[in-house]
Amino acid sequence: MNDKLNQTVTAIKGIGEETAQILAEMNILTVNDLFEHFPYRYEDYRLRDLADAKHEERVTVEGKVHSEPSLVYYGRKKSRLTIRLLVGRYLIQVIFFNQPYLKNKISINNTITVTGKWDQHRQSITANSIQFGPYSKNKEFEPVYAVKGNLTVKGLRRLINLAFSQFGEDIHETLPVSLLKKYKLMNRRDALRAIHFPFTSEDIKQARRRFVYEEFLYFQIKMQALRKFERENSNGVAQKYDLEKVKQFISSLPFSLTTAQKRVTNEILFDMKSQFRMNRLLQGDVGSGKTAVATIALFASVTAGYQGALMVPTEILAEQHAESITSLLEPFGIRCELLTSAIKGKRRREILQQLQAGEIDILIGTHALIQDEVHFHQLGLVITDEQHRFGVEQRRVLREKGENPDVLFMTATPIPRTLAITAFGEMDVSVINEMPAGRKTIETYWAKHEMLDRILAFMEKELSKGRQAYVICPLIEESDKLDVQNAIDVYNQLEAYFHGRYKVGLMHGRLHSEEKEAVMKAFSVNEIQILVSTTVVEVGVNVPNATVMVIYDAERFGLAQLHQLRGRVGRGSEQSYCILLADPKTEVGKERMRIMTETNDGFVLSEKDLELRGPGDFFGKKQSGIPEFKVADMVHDYRALEAARNDAAKLIQSKEFWELPEYASLRDHLYRSGALSGEKLD
Ligand code: ADP
Ligand code: MG
């Protein structure tokens, strides 16, 4: 960065301490900050045809004054000036409030240009700006800025103008020339000028295009640098697995892999074999066969002489996985063990001791797996399921134990591609975008709450066939208590309805984890037929006999979350159903319910969700890691995001990047953000 532009704003003649203080409140400290305080929208002064203008839209029109203006005073100091104006074929009224002095400046047959709000019903414009004479093209757009205190938009524009006249020449390029050329982007100085003082819509478009790309590139270069150094500095393990045995294992599976499963398996095996440490995200819809892929990877790791660990979010899920994975791997002489907090005393000591001695090949459990007392003999691969949060901290724990395993994160939350490469930009991403053949799609219906009787009758029919049902009550955000009460109410209602015929269980966040496990267990062995629950059940549990999912107040959930919940059914061979009880008030709400009934594709849903709710809401408040961009929009500018990502990945690997002056700005950025020293990112 150029030193001159890094001076505080008071370096600009005309900006004193007082103004500087207001600017500081807006986070504008340096001259460069002022240049980078971009307008959030533009006032459009282009001439409009009234035939296309919508009600209440802001328009600019040129017309001929049709009769002498009439001025009416009312109240104290209040006035209304009305002008009849002939605009093309339209005779409209133009109204100015509280500007009586205009009366003497306008006469019949004058041509004037006015801008204001169009009232289609009254055929009138409430004007707030006027040009005497015909429309002139010199100012089609006027930028509008966020301002604070007694600084007005106009005042801010003046300051930016001052900055340009004194420091315009000091604006230097921050993008590599090669990339400017590649995408035909405006240079920085022109782009700054165009974004603050545009003449045409094309100016704005081109300037914006440049800054969108710049923002993405600067972000991605950081992510890609992290990725590179994470891999190279970590001396991962090169797992020389036995390909023949892996093939044998794959052909021993009761099904053949889908094309997508084969592809991601190859991606994972490639990483495992390389000296780099794998840091990979495996995405795939519920039931797409991620666990099968994970099992292959674990198998491969064992053939290479390493141990593997699989971490899942709940104990019950750990038990389920341990059971199914053991049955697949045991015939190959591989020893799997389950480790949960329920395993205590002597048995626990045995497992820990055998693990350290290398007698256990694969350990399956909750995240307790990587705690202090657990020591592996030679850990090669860690796989985590639905643990977005397994991250920096846990990896540090492993590193400090001297383990440097390959890591694979699995998630069934379909993260839109754009978010995946942003939030997880430092990871590699594999996607299973295909379901095993012959799956029955879950039929999804949207019903109003008043139809509850029919829903209950439908549940009864399914239950009578020996099936089971989930009933989900939403989290009530403001109140944990209401939330539980809500679930209890629904439980009581269903209990009364099905009494004596079917057993209803209740699960909510106030239960202790042993109580939760007990309820889940009872449901999984069909001692309970109906499970009423808050969304705690959202994280994976596998009960193939459950075929009905009823979701109360479905409009309160995000699409991705609804889809996750829906994925709890449809796991067996029977047709499954998902019923959304919802009375959405808004169009967006209705649209979301419709989308749910129309598609079973998690990725389509997640893209829609992102579009409807925006990135901030997508992961919920807790999830961070998604940067805020000034100009760029991850959803609408995803092409630029992808381009920037690819460019950044290439740059980081190239020799030129580390040597040539044209990349100095980007390199500086890496040093300043700590990406190179491995410190925390800003
Ligand atoms: P996920 O972990 O993605 O939810 P799983 O690996 O648990 O999915 O697979 C879901 C079910 O589908 C399991 O019963 C599994 O045995 C089966 N399955 C996995 N891959 C295939 C395949 N290629 N063809 C048929 N069935 C498969
Ligand atoms: Mg799974």
Image (cartoon, rainbow, N blue to C red):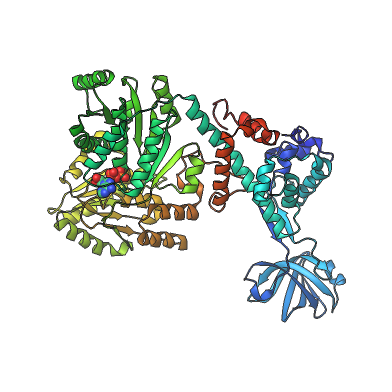
Residue 314 visible = no
Q: Is residue 171 above or below residue 135?
A: above
Camera-side residue of 650 and 199: 650
Residue 564 picture location, percent across and down? 34, 49
Residue in view at x 71 percent, y 69 percent: 126
Q: Quadrant of the N terminus?
A: top right
In this rendered view, identify the residue nearer to me: 593 or 166.
Answer: 166
Does residue 453 appear in this view? yes
Is 65 on the left or on the right of 523, as rendered?
right
Side (left or right) of 13 relative to 431: right
Q: Could you tell me residue 161's position as x and y percent?
A: 80, 47
Q: Quadrant of the rendered structure where residue 448 is?
A: bottom left
Quarter of the image with the C terminus in it = top right
Query: What's the residue at 50%, 43% (across, down)?
Result: 421
Tell me where residue 181 appears, x and y as whole percent. Answer: 68, 47
Q: Residue at x 35, y 30 (%)?
A: 382
Instruction: Tell me the quarter of the picture where residue 60 sits.
Output: bottom right
Is residue 216 placed above or below 661 in the rendered structure? below
Where residue 81 sits in the image (x, y, percent)? 78, 71
Of all residues, the one furthest to the right in this rendering is 104
The image shows a total of numbered marks equal to 0
In the figure, residue 654 lies in which quadrant?
Answer: top right
